[in-house]
Amino acid sequence: MAKKKKQPTKYSINLWLMVRDVLMEAMSRGQLLLAGFILVLIIIVARMPSQDVSQLIFQLIDIMVALPLLGYALAGVFLCGWAIHIRKQGQMYEREISRITGMRDEAQRKLIGPDKIKSSED
């Protein structure tokens, strides 16, 4: 007797599924607070009168034009922070590899015996 084939599940993608997926992903990555803050800002701007929104945008552009060095300074700070983070991650990675290698070698010595394993360093 032939086996019945399973029918593929049909998913309908809509706005609420997209919102659910975005919120679940934000929660799993610890970014829910940031997503909530951005949502509140969007709601505040959406409720403002259109003339106030245009004034707000022009003020933000004026601030960016008046303080171009602030952007460069922030970029430099972020670059230095990134470089420090990468260096620390590399050091942590090297320590972990050394620890795992030592554990592996110790387990091999216990299992096989210390006199049966020849070192490649000899």
Image (cartoon, rainbow, N blue to C red):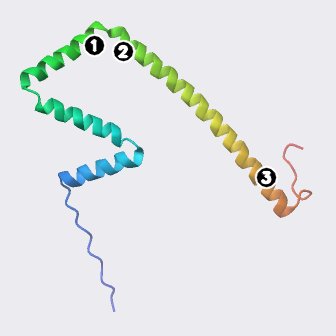
Of pointers 3 and 1, the one earlier in the residue sequence = 1
The amino acid beneath tag 3 is Asp
| Residue at x 26%, y 12% (from the top left corner) | 63
Q: Quadrant of residue 111?
A: bottom right
Of pointers 2 and 3, the one earlier in the residue sequence = 2
Q: CA distance from mark 1 to mark 2?
A: 8 Å
The amino acid beneath tag 1 is Met
Judged from the image, the secondary structure of the residue bearing numbered disc 3 is helix
Vertical comparison of 31 with 57: above or below: below
Judge left or right: residue 89 versus residue 39: right
| Residue at x 11%, y 32% (from the top left corner) | 47
| Residue at x 16%, y 29% (from the top left corner) | 45
Which numbered dot is residue 64? 1
Q: Which residue is mark 3?
A: 105
Quadrant where the N terminus is found in the figure: bottom left
Q: Which residue is mark 2?
A: 71
State yes or no: discs 1 and 2 in contact (Cβ < 8 Å).
yes
The amino acid beneath tag 2 is Gly
Q: Position of residue 18 (x, y in %)?
A: 24, 51
Judge left or right: residue 76 versus residue 91: left
- Disc 3: CA contacts within 10 A as few (<14), some (14-19) or many (>=20): some
Judged from the image, the secondary structure of the residue bearing numbered disc 1 is helix
Quadrant where the C terminus is found in the figure: top right
Vertical comparison of 24 with 53: above or below: below
Q: Position of residue 101 (x, y in %)?
A: 73, 48
| Residue at x 35%, y 45% (from the top left corner) | 26
Q: Position of residue 27 (x, y in %)?
A: 37, 48
Judge by depth and name the residue closer to the eye, 8 or 103. Answer: 103
Q: Residue furthest bottom?
A: 1
Q: CA distance from mark 3 to mark 1?
A: 58 Å
Q: Residue furthest top?
A: 66
Judge left or right: residue 28 versus residue 8: right
